[in-house]
Image (cartoon, grey):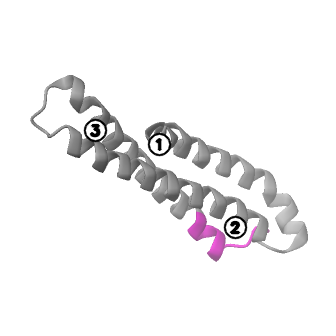
């Protein structure tokens, strides 16, 4: 479960945060605050970091069970956890890249 959360959940969180942020731009401009946008992106970022750390822990545990020289079947969980960790890391970096312009540019621009 920890692996799938990072593998499928973090890219979904990025897409959901992007969609919700786009929908919140008119209200954020009317309210003259960036808090709704920052809150959505921050929540998605927190989820992404936690899911990535859980996948990384699973990768470490699976690597202890199956060394790199193991046959395919025991090495599968380690490879899947490694992939989930990398997907989670890319998703986390994408959310940080989405959050930086929210600090610098007003929603009304």
The residue that label 1 is drawn on is 2
In the rendering, which numbered label is found on residue 38? Answer: 2
Q: Are marks 1 and 3 in contact (CB under 8 Å)?
A: no
Cα gap from disc 1 to disc 2, whole angstroms = 26 Å
Cα gap from disc 3 to disc 2, whole angstroms = 34 Å
The residue that label 3 is drawn on is 78
Which one is nearer the viewer's eye here, 87 or 5? 5
Image spot of residue 104 (x, y percent): 63, 76
- Element type where label 1 sits in the image: helix
Image spot of residue 57 (x, y percent): 37, 52
Look at discs 1 and 2 and give the one toward the viewer: 1
Disc tally is 3
Q: Magenta region: which residues?
A: 99-109
Look at discs 3 and 2 and give the one toward the viewer: 3
Q: Is residue 106 left or right of residue 62?
A: right
Q: Residue at x 70, y 46 (%)?
A: 19
Q: Residue at x 51, y 37 (%)?
A: 8
**Mark 2 or mark 3, which is nearer the start of the sequence?**
2
Cα gap from disc 1 to disc 3, whole angstroms = 12 Å
Does residue 35 lie above or below 10 as drawn? below
Residue 57 colored in magenta in the image:
no
Q: Which residue of the protein is positioned furthest toward the left in this rendering?
A: 69
Q: Is residue 77 left or right of residue 31?
A: left
**Mark 3 or mark 1, which is nearer the start of the sequence?**
1
Q: Which residue of the protein is positioned furthest toward the right in this rendering?
A: 30
């Amino acid at each position: 479960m920890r692996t799938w959360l990072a593998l499928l959940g973090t890219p979904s969180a990025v897409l959901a945060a992007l969609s919700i942020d786009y929908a919140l731009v008119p209200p954020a401009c009317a309210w003259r605050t960036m808090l709704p946008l920052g809150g959505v992106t921050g929540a998605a970022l927190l989820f992404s970091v936690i899911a990535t750390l859980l996948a990384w822990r699973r990768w470490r545990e699976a690597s202890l069970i199956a060394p790199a020289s193991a046959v395919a079947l025991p090495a599968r969980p380690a490879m899947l956890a490694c992939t989930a960790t990398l997907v989670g890391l890319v998703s986390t970096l994408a959310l940080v890249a989405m959050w930086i312009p929210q600090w610098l540019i007003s929603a009304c621009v």
